[in-house]
Image (cartoon, rainbow, N blue to C red):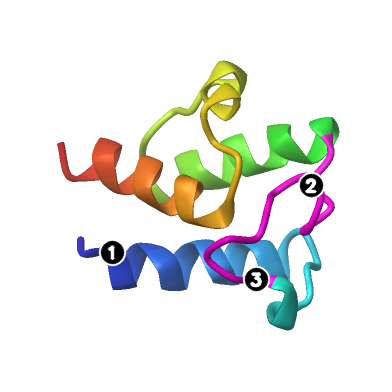
Amino acid sequence: MDIKEIEAKVKALLIDDLEIAEENIAPDARLKEDLGIDSLEVVDVVVLVEQAFGYKMKNEDFKVIKTYSDLLNFIDSKVNA
């Protein structure tokens, strides 16, 4: 799965499941500050990523994931390892 496919899935999850406005989703958008993803929604992201990509994220993974781009690259590194 290439990064464009990963991005399409992640963007759809953020828009559809977390109701984040598409225009707010940019590579440098910070998950917490810009997209409004709080600690409870992090749990939702963990579940959604597992369902969409088969990789079980941990809440601790979000210590290194700060931006939308970080999230995409993290998923890419795990899915395409």
Q: Which residue is mark 1?
A: 3
Disc 3 crowd rating (10 Å Cα; few below 14, some 14-19, many 20+) is some
Left or right of 4: which side holds 1? left
Q: Residues within 10 Å of mark 2 (few under 14, many from 20)?
A: some
Q: Residue at x 38, y 40 (%)?
A: 74
> What's the amino acid at mark 1?
Ile
Q: Which mark is residue 37?
A: 2
Residue 48 place in picture, x, y as percent: 58, 47
Q: Residue furthest top?
A: 60
Residue 19 left/right relative to 74: right
Spatial CA distance of label 1 from label 3 is 16 Å
Q: Position of residue 52 (x, y in %)?
A: 44, 52
Residue 36 picture location, percent across and down = 84, 52
Callout 2–callout 3 Cβ contact below 8 Å: no
**Where 74 falls versus 34 (above or below)?**
above
Q: Quick check: 17 above or below 52?
A: below
Question: Dot 1: within a 10 Å radius of its alpha carbon, few (fewer than 14), some, or many (20 or more) residues?
Answer: some
Residue under label 3, please give it.
25
Image point 81% across, 49% down: which residue?
Answer: 33
Q: Amino acid at mark 2?
A: Ile
Image: magenta residue range: 25-38
